[in-house]
Amino acid sequence: MKAKIISIANQKGGVGKTTTAINLAYSLATLGKKVLIIDIDPQANSTSGLGLDPSTCEYTIYDILLSRIQIKSAIVSSLFENLDLIPADINLVGAEIELINSISRETILKEHLESIRGHYEYIFMDCSPSLGLLTINSLTASDTVIIPVQCEYFALEGLGKLMNTIKIIQTRLNTNLNIEGILLTMFDTRLNLSNQVVSEISKHFNNLVFDTIIPRNIRLSESPSFGIPVMLHDPSSIGSKSYINLANEILKRAEVKV
Ligand SMILES: Nc1ncnc2c1ncn2[C@@H]1O[C@H](COP(=O)(O)OP(=O)(O)OP(=O)(O)O)[C@@H](O)[C@H]1O
Ligand SMILES: [Mg+2]
């Protein structure tokens, strides 16, 4: 077993990164895969969305990045089978500045992950809405990146910059980095705009776009407040079904590649 490491990244805020991290990871876990989520965002939304209080976690990703502990010590079991978590908390806001003078500061996470890769099949990293050192660490440590894009007017804004950052990382820090896919999120069937965004993104990025499109669904936005994935909040909801479809799409693609 050697985990596929996937960053979920977009420096645009509120596009569905955390919602995707939690519900995609949980879907794969229910399909029998051993999955780890690493919360690498000071907002710690993946941590609280999985029912953990960030302020009570003994260790977080911050301790790992500052090389205070072994990565294994920060792993906690979630309440859900096959799903583990490395939490984040608000201390992580300071990490970028504290690491500024460290040697090979971009590869810290990559080095740490080597020791636990054998324990999982998928490792997802829920990035913060920035292209700073935390996201660079995540992309440098990853095999692929999932880019959630919200079906709204400014969807394409900033995507060029993200693609450029990915290219720079591919040349300088991680030649293996690939794009897993662009995930269209918060699609609203009632809006012409949503359809326009889908066709525009598909035109630009054609085969990079996942077939699965995540619709806007109230159940998806409610479930984090209960600290559970949407599948446990309302298994028959369209949000739940969509993320299970995405998990299956990712599994199928992986089979084709091999
Ligand atoms: N498909 C959806 N339908 C309805 N609400 C959604 C959907 N996806 C996400 N949301 C809601 O939109 C908000 C932003 O989503 P989320 O936190 O996943 O984005 P994010 O990219 O992680 O944000 P940030 O950049 O702040 O980390 C949240 O309140 C979330 O519950
Ligand atoms: Mg988030």
Image (spheres, grey):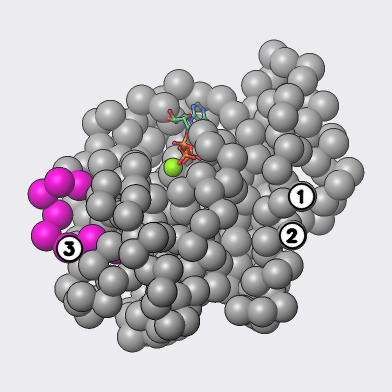
**Disc 1 target residue:** 160
- For label 2, the SS is helix
The reply to whether residue 241 is visible in this rendering is: no
Q: Which stretch is magenta?
A: 54-61
Q: Residues within 10 Å of mark 1 (few under 14, many from 20)?
A: few
Marked residue nearer the N-terminal end (3 or 1): 3
Find residue 47 and report its horizontal and vertical position in percent. Answer: 28, 48
Label at residue 112: none
Amino acid carrying label 3: it is Tyr
Q: Check the image and report above or below for 95 versus 173.
A: above
Q: Are marks 2 and 1 in contact (CB under 8 Å)?
A: yes
| Whole-number angstrom distance, CA of label 2 to CA of label 1 | 6 Å
| Amino acid on which disc 1 is placed | Gly
Q: Which mark is residue 59?
A: 3
Whether the residues at callouts 3 and 2 have beta carbons within 8 Å, the answer is no
| Amino acid beneath label 2 | Asn
Q: Which residue is mark 2?
A: 164
